[in-house]
């Protein structure tokens, strides 16, 4: 049916089922409701609210947590800038804390140093599939009465001290964008066990409708009241962030295969790790003994001076030897032109020195392979590349 190893007849079956039903009006019986229920069961949480994308999830989680104009939210600079953009969408101020040199994740000590009386939330990112030091971050949050929103866009089924990423903070956001562990093209989910947050999430995603409930398909108001011309619908400002049922049908099929998808990414990462383990100038992201990564990417740092080996030279040779290529890390969010414009505050180079040192030297190998032959081919290309530069 398709050339993508992640898509098979299961997605098509669900889409056909939806089209055959004529798009049922009740979210509780729709694929949206089924997808949300599946998330609550998998993660052992009370509520799951679906969204149109993984930036809307973060924006809505911040609003649900009470973050607003002038509040500060601590975020890492080393990640996709959507994390910081969501803070701006909530009319708040992104405050960038530095990262750990070995895990590449938000450094709790740097977070502590960035807290001010205006700090309202911390939004750590589980970069490349690895959860950060959540016990330390939650302790800081308790001390300062802050909300912790996990950005787990790159981390489906990663664990921290035998707990699933997504169950560690007060709320957690997942993305279904097409590079993620599961996809429906675009989409996202927020999970929480806090009923107040869940209700605010549902309302904010639904144009501020007062009748919505945290539970899918349930209304607080009877239909007789809703149809009357005197009925007032909008009790607060909200966005139209709801996930479509057809996207939910695809996402549900993907979610039911999630364990398989993560296993293939871990197999790919293991193949890269076996090649890299004896290379002193390639330093992989450190995975602490009490964590597991779901390896959205296999990330390594070029631990050699740029005059001896440039990022570009390594990329070119990897492709020459049969590799599919890889990605560099995103420019640090506060060094992007939008933040350097001064419109959203003053963010000068030197703000997060560890992240600034890491970012130009990071290599993100893709792990999105679903057969052993493809994995072996990428690992062999990496091995040849390492041997080439060792011989130089």
Image: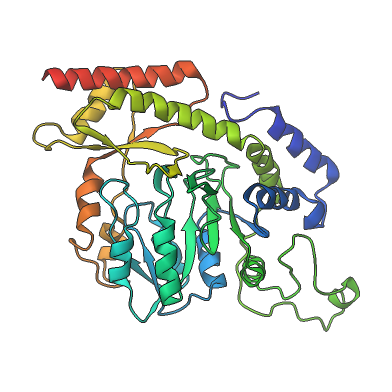
Image position of 323 with respect to 147: above or below: above
Closer to the camera, 120 or 140? 140
Could you say which quadrant of the image residue 197 lies in? bottom right
Counting every numbered tag in the picture gives 0
Image position of 11 with respect to 373: above or below: below
Residue 112 visible to the viewer:
yes
Image position of 294 with respect to 229: above or below: above
Q: In which quarter of the image is the N terminus?
A: top right
Q: Where residue 59 appears, x then y in whole percent?
A: 51, 65
Residue 368 visible to the viewer:
no
Residue located 53% across and 49% down the image? 163
Residue located 28% across and 70% down the image? 113
Q: In which quarter of the image is the C terminus?
A: top left
Q: Where residue 187 appears, x then y in whole percent?
A: 58, 50
Name, please, the residue furthest toward the right.
224
Q: Where residue 84 appears, x then y in whole percent?
A: 39, 62
Would residue 123 be found to the left or right of residue 312 on screen?
right
Residue located 53% across and 39% down the image? 181
Image position of 259 with respect to 168: above or below: above
Query: What colour scheme has been applied to the protein in the rendered image?
Result: rainbow
Closer to the camera, 350 or 264? 264
């Amino acid at each position: 049916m398709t050339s993508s190893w992640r898509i098979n007849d299961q997605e098509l079956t669900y889409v056909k089922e939806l089209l055959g039903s004529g798009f049922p009006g009740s979210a509780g019986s729709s694929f949206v409701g089924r997808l949300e229920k599946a998330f609550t069961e998998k993660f052992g949480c009370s509520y799951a609210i679906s969204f149109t994308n993984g930036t809307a999830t973060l924006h809505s989680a911040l609003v649900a947590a009470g973050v607003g104009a002038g509040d500060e939210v601590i975020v890492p600079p080393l990640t996709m800038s959507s994390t910081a953009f969501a803070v701006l969408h909530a009319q708040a101020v992104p405050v960038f804390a530095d990262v750990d040199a070995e895990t590449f994740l938000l450094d709790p000590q740097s977070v502590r140093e960035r807290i001010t009386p205006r700090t309202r939330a911390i939004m750590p990112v589980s970069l490349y599939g690895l959860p950060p030091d959540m016990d330390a971050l939650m302790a800081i949050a308790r001390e300062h009465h802050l909300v912790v929103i996990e950005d787990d866009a790159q981390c489906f089924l990663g664990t921290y001290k035998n707990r699933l990423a997504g169950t560690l903070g007060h709320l957690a956001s997942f993305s279904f964008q097409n590079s993620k562990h599961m996809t429906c093209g675009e989409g996202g989910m927020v999970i929480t066990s806090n009923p107040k947050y869940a209700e605010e999430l549902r309302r904010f995603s639904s144009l501020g409708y007062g009748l919505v409930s945290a539970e899918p398909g349930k209304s607080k108001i009877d239909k007789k009241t809703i149809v009357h011309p005197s009925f007032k619908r909008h009790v607060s400002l909200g966005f139209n962030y709801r996930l479509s049922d057809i996207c939910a049908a695809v996402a549900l099929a993907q979610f039911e295969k999630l364990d398989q998808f993560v296993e293939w990414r871990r197999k790919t990462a293991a193949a890269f790790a076996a090649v890299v383990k004896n290379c002193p100038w390639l330093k992989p992201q450190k995975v602490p003994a009490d964590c597991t990564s779901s390896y959205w990417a296999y990330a390594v740092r070029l631990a050699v001076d740029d005059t001896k080996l440039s990022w570009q030279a390594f990329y070119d040779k990897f492709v020459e030897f049969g590799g599919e290529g890889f990605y560099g890390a995103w420019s640090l969010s506060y060094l992007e032109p939008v933040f350097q414009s001064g419109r959203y505050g003053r963010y000068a180079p030197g703000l997060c020195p560890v992240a600034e040192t890491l970012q130009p030297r990071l290599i993100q190998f893709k792990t999105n392979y679903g057969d052993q032959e493809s994995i072996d081919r990428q690992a062999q290309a990496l091995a040849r590349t390492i041997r080439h530069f060792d011989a130089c």
